[in-house]
Image (cartoon, rainbow, N blue to C red):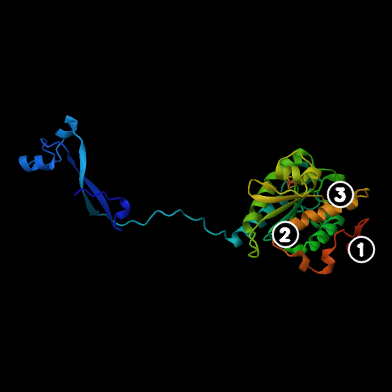
Amino acid sequence: MKARRSARDAEPGSVWLAIYACGAFHCSRSPEGAARTGLDHQSTCCARGGHTFDVVEYKRHAVAMQSPALPQRAPPPDARRLRLLMRRLERRCSDCTQCGLSRTRQKVAFGRGNPEAPVCFVGEAPGAEEDAQGKPFVGRAGRLLDEMIQQMGLSPDDVYICNIVKCRPPDNRKPTPAEIRACSAHLHEQLSLWAQTSTWPAPTAKRILVALGNTAISTLLDTRQGVSELRGKWKLYRGRIMVMPTYHPSFLMRPFATQAQSKKEAASDLSLVAKELGLDISLAQPARRTILYSIEGGKSAAPKEPQS
Ligand code: SF4
C-alpha cells in the first residue's frame, strides 16, 4: 500500500526518502517490469519515454544529528565597557576643536547626572556658569530643571542631562547650524552610549529623551516644527527612543504674560514622562506635587501647592 509520510513523521535523526517507480506496466522500472526483467528500476529509460512516476514507498534513512541553527542573540552590553566609552568620548570632547566655540570656551560641559538613568534631558548649549564649571544645567535654568525633575518624583541624580552643543556660544547666543552640525557626532554617540548603558531594572526598561526647547527638538527630531506644536506629543528619536518635546527652563523663566500657562504645560509634559516610566506621582512627597514651578526671577522660593 502506498503510504504518504511527511517530514513531520520522521523521528529525530532520520529523514524519509521517497522511492519512485514507473507506473507503466511494460516498463522495466515499474515494480512488475523490474520483476519480469530483473532490471533495477533506477534506469533512466522511463524519463526519456515520458512515463509517469509514482511514489511506491518511503524509507527512513538515518542522518547525522545537527544542532538546529538558532538565531544568535546579541551579547548583553558590558556596562563597564560602555562607561569607559562614555568617559573616552568626554575626553575627546574636552580636546575637540571642530568648531569655533572651542576658541572661546573655558570648559566643555559634556553631561551630568547618571548616564545609566532611563531619562535623558537634552538642552541647547551651556551658559556662563556651565562654561565655568564644565557641567550642563548648573545655572539658574539648571536649578529650575532640577525642580521640575523633583516634581516628577525623581532626584536630579536619577536622570542624565546634556546639551546639543558641548561648548558655550559667546554672549549666550543660539548655536549656529554649522556648530550644531559639528557637534552632532558627539551628541549622537553620547545618546547611543546612554541608551545602551541605561540599566535601570524596574519598573521599566524604557529609555526616554526629553527635548528641552526648539534647538533640541529640531536637532533630535530633524523637524522644523517648534515646541508649541510638538510639546506633549510622543515622538521617536532615530525610530526607537521615545522623545517628549517640552519647553526649555530658560524660556519658562522669561517674564511673559502667558508664562503660567507654559509652566502648567511643561508640568503636564513631564507628568506624561513620569507615567511612562511607571512612577506614581501621587505617592511623591507633597512638595513634589506642585503644578506651578516656583522659581520667579531666577530665585527658588518654597514650592506652592496648587490652588484648588
Ligand atoms: S561645540 Fe562640540 S564640535 Fe564645537 S568645539 Fe565644542 S565639542 Fe567640539
Residue on which disc 2 sits: 275
Does residue 158 appear left or right of residue 143 in this picture? left
Residue 50 occupies quadrant? top left
Does residue 146 appear left or right of residue 98 in this picture? right
Amino acid type of disc 2?
Answer: Lys
**Residue at the image position 61 percent from the left and 58 percent from the top:** 82
Mark 2: secondary structure: helix
Task: Provide residue 109's location: percent of width, then percent of height.
Answer: 77, 53
The label on residue 301 is 1
Mark 1: secondary structure: loop
- 164 or 2: which is nearer to us? 2
Residue on which disc 3 sits: 251
Q: Are dots 3 and 2 in contact, CB under 8 Å? A: no
Amino acid type of disc 3?
Answer: Phe
Task: Provide residue 218's location: percent of width, then percent of height.
Answer: 75, 42
- 32 or 256: which is nearer to us? 32
Q: Are dots 2 and 1 in contact, CB under 8 Å? A: no
Crowding at label 1, few (<14), some or many (≥20) Cα neighbours within 10 Å?
few
The furthest residue to the top? 49
Crowding at label 3, few (<14), some or many (≥20) Cα neighbours within 10 Å?
some
Mark 3: secondary structure: helix
Task: Provide residue 9's location: percent of width, then percent of height.
Answer: 30, 55
Amino acid type of disc 1?
Answer: Ala
Q: CA distance from mark 3 to mark 2?
A: 24 Å
Q: Earlier in the sequence, mark 3 or mark 1?
A: 3
Looking at the rendering, in which quadrant would you find the C terminus?
A: bottom right
Task: Provide residue 1's location: percent of width, then percent of height.
Answer: 19, 49
